[in-house]
Amino acid sequence: MKLSTLNLLPKATSLVLAALFFFAFLPNQTAQAQTEEVLTEVDVMPQPTGGLAGWNTYLAENLKYPEAAQEKKIEGTVIVKFVVLDSGELDQVEILRGIGGGCDEEVLRLVKEAPKWTPGKKDGEVVNVQMRLPVRFKL
């Protein structure tokens, strides 16, 4: 069973709102990745191609609710972590919290195949930024 684009749009909108809420409470810490600093708190957060409307469109057109999850009536929120590099590419994609049924793999696929983002900035310089994104699956 494939969800229609119209059915996904409200889910995508709530996803973006949840993501904005989630980003507002990221801890203030740094890590090392690919020999460059990765920040979690910046002056200008990275943005997906086309902004929030572009991300909603991307989700509506590309998110596929896995059949196994639908058959088992698996619902919930997958939390994915990734780094938006200073080039805008997404890297170090990993699941922080999964729900199974193929949903975790679907979120990994979506993020890994996503178009480049506009990178974040700190003190006027483009930097690598760690992001967390909730993706909700609901029948």
Image: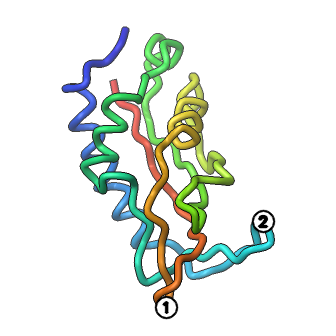
Give the alpha-carbon distance from disc 1 to disc 2, as whole Å: 21 Å
Query: Where is the N terminus found, in terms of image quarters?
Result: top left
Q: Residues within 10 Å of mark 2 (few under 14, many from 20)?
A: few
Q: Earlier in the sequence, mark 1 or mark 2?
A: 2
Give amino acid for label 1.
Asp
Q: Is residue 69 above or below residue 75?
A: above
List the single residue furthest toward the bottom: 123
Residue at the spot x=25%, y=45% of the render? Answer: 13
Residue 14: image x %, image y %? 27, 47
Q: Secondary structure at mark 2?
A: loop
Residue 112: image x %, image y %? 58, 41
Q: Is residue 79 above or below residue 105?
A: below
Residue 127: image x %, image y %? 57, 76
Q: Nearer the viewer, residue 111 or 73?
A: 111
Give amino acid for label 2.
Gln
Q: Which residue is mark 2?
A: 34
Q: Is residue 83 left or right of residue 54?
A: right
List the single residue furthest toward the right: 35
